[in-house]
Amino acid sequence: MRARDLLGKAAEVVTFLFAMFGGFLTGIAPPERVSTFAVGFGSVLALILFLFLAVIAKGRFSRQRRRIWLIAAGVLAAGTLASGLIYQQMRDERTFFYPPESQAEEFLRGTDYQPKALTEKMQRSLSVSQLVAEYGGPGNRHLIWSEESLRRSRTLLTFVFLALVVTLGGTIFCLIELYLATHPTRAKAGSAKPRHPR
């Protein structure tokens, strides 16, 4: 397969990865501007991973080699499950919807409250969205959480999301290579040269 064809195939697979299940991965990306970076960088990482696996998958698949690929797929699948659960928990802890009435948009939040904001939240039993509204909206989040806490939320959510993308993509790519190696199709016939009458 030529380099251009391989890149085209890789791009198709990565596009499918982010489009499958109604754009599931794109939909759960960290909110705000972080989403653009996370999805873009995740796509690049998935592309690199696909090309890497395509290179090392070349050649005949012996029984031992198939076993190694199957184990790799299993490990990556376990990583997908773990990173997915961790990401969901962290997303619940580090994001909020605003405004409180409609929950129209999702925003990042910190976990370390400023003393005054924490006191007000506890005394008045306010939800996170209500507390943000009391302080004038998401633009004043630094008055509720420390800048370091907000930055940490952004970094952690991005990191775990990328781990989810890489492990999920790796699982799918490994299984595709395994399937193609163990179930050679007759699609190759399409690439066979036509025989011309003499």
Image (cartoon, grey):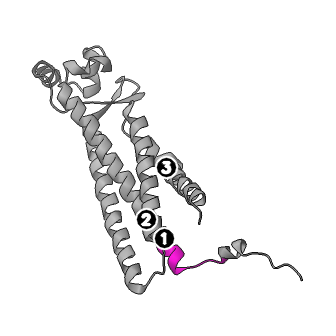
- Kind of element beneath mark 3: helix
Q: Earlier in the sequence, mark 2 or mark 1?
A: 2
Residue 23 or residue 46, whichever sits in front: 46
Report the amino acid beneath label 3.
Phe
Residue 160 falls inside the magenta stretch: no
Residue 182 falls inside the magenta stretch: yes
In magenta, the rendered stretch is 178-186
Q: CA distance from mark 2 to mark 1?
A: 8 Å
For the residues bearing labels 2 and 1, Cβ distance under 8 angstroms = yes
Say which residue label 1 marks.
Answer: 177
Q: Would you identify the image quadrant in which residue 56 lies?
A: bottom left
Tell me the residue at 43%/65% (across/down).
Answer: 53
Say which residue label 2 marks.
Answer: 53
Q: Quadrant of the C terminus?
A: bottom right
Which mark is nearer the camera, 2 or 3? 2
In the image, residue 13 above or below residue 132: below
Q: Earlier in the sequence, mark 1 or mark 3?
A: 3
